[in-house]
Every structure is written in C-alpha cells, then in structure tokens.
Image (cartoon, grey):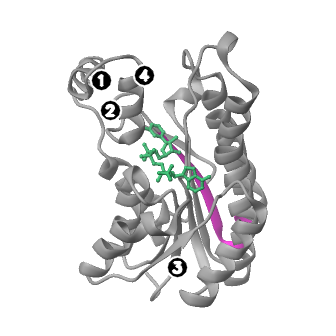
Amino acid sequence: MADSRVAIVTGAARGIGAATAKRLAEDGFAVAVIDLDEKHCAETVSAIEAAGGKALAVGCDVSDAEQVQAAVDRVAAELGAPTALVNNAGVIRDNMLFKMSEDDWDTVMGVHLRGAFLMSRAVQKHMVEAKWGRIVNLSSTSALGNRGQANYSTAKAGLQGLTKTLAIELGKYGVTANAIAPGFIATDMTRATAERVGMEFEEFTKAAAASIPVARVGQPEDIANTVSFFLDERAGFVSGQVIYVAGGPKA
Ligand code: NAP
C-alpha cells in the first residue's frame, strides 16, 4: 500500500468501529477516529498509538452537515487527505410500528442514511483528487426485514442503494464503494437489544448462536477483517457489492 493513506472510521469509539480503526491502523492507514464525543475516542486512539500507529480523535455528529465538513477539513489538515471512509456510526431506536415515534424514525435515518450521505459527499473530493478511494458502508442483515426495526431495516436497506450508486458515480475516479451487512455481532448495540427483550447478554448470545451455521455470534474483528479486505489495494475491481457477514447464508 502507498505510504500513509488516511482512513476515516465513524462511530469508532467502541464496538465494530473501534475494532475497524485498530485493524486499519495495523494495515498501515493513519486513522481518523470519529465519534459523537471526542473524549470517547481516546481509548481507540491510545490503542492505535501504543501499537505504533497514527490516529486522530475527532468529535462529530455525522448527521450534522457543518460538523461533518469541519471534521473532514480537520482530518485533511492534521492527518492528510482522507481517501478511505467507513460509514459505521449507528444507533437503534427499536419499536413495533404502532409504537414507533417520528423521532425514533428520524433519528435512525439521520445517523445511518443522512450521516453516510454527508460523510461520503465531504470525503469524495479528496478521493477524486487522489484518483483513489475506498468507501465501506455498514448495512445489516436487518436490511432484509426485522420485527421491531422498521426504521433501522429501512435505513440499512437504503445504505445498500447508496453503496451501489456511489460505486457507479465514483468508479471512474478509482473509487470503490461496498457494503457489509453484519449478522449478530457482540457489541454494546446487541447488549442493548438483550436488555430491551429482558434477557441476560450471555443467554441472548447463546440463543442467537444456536441459529447461526458457524455456531457462534460474530465479534467486531470479524467485520474489521472484511473492511480490511475492501480497503486493500488488490480489491480495486470489487465494487457496488453487499457482503453478508453473518456466519451463514441467511439472516
Ligand atoms: P455501537 O457499539 O453502538 O457503536 C456505535 C458508535 O456510533 C457509538 O460509539 C456511537 O456513539 C456512535 N454514534 C452514534 N451516533 C453517532 C453520530 N450521530 N455521529 C457519530 N457517531 C455516532 O454499535 P456497533 O454494534 O459497533 O455497530 C456499528 C455499526 O454496525 C452500526 O452502523 C450498526 O448499525 C451496524 N451493525 C451492527 C450489528 C451488531 O450486531 N452489533 C449488526 C449489523 C449492523 P455514542 O456511544 O456516543 O452513542
């Protein structure tokens, strides 16, 4: 890989984003660790630096256009032009349709869809200038439909459409765009779901693993490895794809 390419990972204070930021630093990227609160990024940044990598903590709400532009400008000034982007920041506001508020709907659309749009729009300029770029969007098996997640499944399906369109529009500039649709990954997000349904996390993961062909739930590193593949120099002919990383063929 060319020296010191710069990657941005959103929602990288914890979970899948943190594991991805660390993995990309191991791969040789300088990594901008973006999350809502800059202070919460410190752990990821320290881990990267302790392993000899380069990282920058940036506080930014990805659903806010001004904050997104300011964050991307800061990354470009302090780390260098970002040419890899992982749109990972996410929230859940699960509820059955009849109980889902407009706020639950708008919040989820704002972070996942508007966030990925704003970040991609702000970063593409650097990719087009460099004639090289990699975008990875975090979709989900919920894109196929999931009870209690009308908002989330819609946003995650929408991200697949965004991914394919970015691949078509940006391909001629050397930019690929792909999506990863994880199944059950053990993070705070799935912990929150366990809590919502009134189960201990261990019991919840055991039950989930029972219906997964590889007989275990996923770990953040399973997704980080897949992001690493898409960002590799040698993956330049893979674009507009959605890969389900779910321990089996079905959600
Ligand atoms: P997580 O542990 O809840 O982490 C999500 C991170 O995103 C948090 O650090 C959160 O910050 C940050 N974030 C939320 N809103 C943001 C905003 N507006 N701007 C910037 N950052 C924001 O989630 P995860 O499980 O690692 O999930 C990561 C991604 O994978 C999400 O897109 C999720 O939908 C997707 N995914 C997860 C699973 C799974 O099983 N875990 C499955 C399929 C897809 P705060 O801590 O400050 O809220």
Tell me how far mark 2 sits from mark 1, CA to CA.
6 Å
Task: Tell me the chief SS of the magenta region.
Answer: strand
Q: Are marks 1 and 3 in contact (CB under 8 Å)?
A: no
Please tell me how crowded label 4 is: few (under 14), some (14-19), or many (20+) other residues with Cα within 10 Å: few
The quadrant where residue 121 appears: bottom right
Gap between marks 4 and 1, in whole Å?
A: 21 Å
Q: Quadrant of the C terminus?
A: top left
Q: Which residue is mark 3?
A: 6
Residue nearer the viewer, 2 or 73: 73
Q: List the single residue furthest toward the top.
A: 98
Mark nearest the camera among 4 and 3 is 4
The residue wearing badge 4 is 196
- The reply to whether residue 221 is in sight is yes
* Residue visible at 69% across and 56% down in the picture: 167
* Earlier residue among tags 1 and 3: 3
Instruction: Point out which mark residue 247 bears.
Output: 2
Say if 96 sits above or below 55 in the image.
Answer: above
What's the residue type where badge 2 is placed? Gly
